[in-house]
Amino acid sequence: MSGWGPMSGGAGTAGTAGTAGTAGTAGTAGTAGTAGTAGSNSPVIGLDGGAGYPAYSGLAPNPMVNSALTTTRESSLAGGAAWGLYEKGYTPVPLPFLNQKDVSWKPNRKIEGLQPNVRAALIEMELLQAVKYVESKHHAGLTLKSGAKLVSMGKLGDSVFDCQLQLVESFAALRAERSAEILTQVVPQSSHWSSIAALSPDRHRYTWELLGIGLRFTMMMVMRLKFHFDVQRPWARSALIQPMILTPGYSAYPCGHAAEASFVAEFLPLLAGDPTHPCSTHKKLAGRVDGMATQLNRLAFRVAENRVVAGLHYPVDSIAGQALGVMLARFLAWMTGDGLPGIDRNMLKIGATAFAKPQGVQWDKAQPVFDRFVEKQQYIDPPQTPLPANPSDAPIFSHLWTLARREWAKD
């Protein structure tokens, strides 16, 4: 997992010098810092880095990014996702999805005049006041201030991760063909998201700021859960794993990259009013395989799987990460107080639990299933709790959401 958000980019500047140290430990850490050089001004670290928009746009060509986007697309289009394009009568679902009447807006000089990093700090306070970390002997997770369960995951014993080592070792066979993806996905996957959702740094300035805040908040929740479960990384369990990139200095379960990618896969379609979201009121479009929501969900699966391929995670880490990321996305959308036009609020539920009953699971085979949203992912008890009627007060976050949502509305 990497740092992001308006408050964290400045540290990346020091990392730039590390790129020259390809053979040294300090140099490895430095590469991650490269992406952060403009982080103090950029809402998402990676947006301006060597794996971000300069590479994607061709301003600072990076063949590794282009290669990663090409192979990732092949995965996202699996199962005939593109076949419809060649069928008579095919109707695409073009952007933008929202109408101006779906986005009520009043200028707010006090909020809009803030520096992005200050706005982010204030929003983090709003969000943290509305959620609570909870733990018990066998589970840990998050609840809303009201006490309603947001997400939970079961505590897994050492024997589980010992069994999972077989899968981690077998996934290593994919390292050669996935290396470009793995390296470009170390930082937030801005190029990948842009490729699917037509995200532009010029047209979607507030969207990127909002995503940066959401990713940083997700990272906070992930780190709290990692600290509690304290699961050793694969390389600490076996000298056979030999990860292809440096293992981060914190524990494995749940997977942060899975949580972050799943957060974006759920949050961005809700923000944009994507009619192909599984909870859409457009029943003929909901869940379409060629839609933004499905393509982002498939990307999230690929990002999480690549962390296993690299030797940094166990497959079960990704399952817990998916549950966490999707529930946090719904929490943030709820905190805005937006009615979410086009989304069936009765279907948009919270309270998912990963590994509620770990007994009897074949751990040497347990891994996430491709192309499943959280409601149907194996080993996740689907969310059952409707979002409460009234969110906690978050005026700054709500206004930023509105500014970002306007970027997805028709003129």
Image (cartoon, helix red, strand yellow):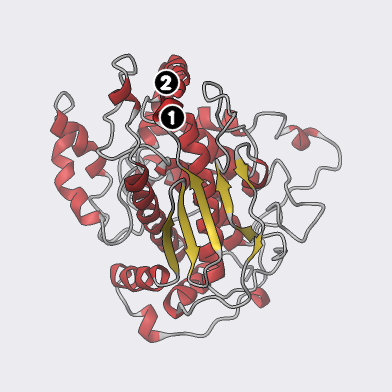
| Secondary structure beneath label 1 | loop
In the image, is residue 130 above or below residue 249? below
Q: Are marks 2 and 1 in contact (CB under 8 Å)?
A: yes
| Secondary structure beneath label 2 | helix
Please name the residue shown 48% across and 30% down the image: 315
Amino acid type at mark 2: Leu
Residue at the disc numbered 2: 165
- Return the residue found at the far front: 137
**For residue 209, which numbered disc appears in the image?**
none
Classify residue 78 as left or right of residue 37: right
Task: Compare residues 307 and 112 and report the one nearer the observer.
Answer: 307
Q: CA distance from mark 2 to mark 1?
A: 7 Å
Amino acid type at mark 1: Tyr
In the image, is residue 29 above or below residue 79? below
Q: Earlier in the sequence, mark 2 or mark 1?
A: 2
Classify residue 366 as left or right of residue 92: left
In the image, is residue 179 above or below residue 321? above
**For residue 314, which numbered disc appears in the image?**
1
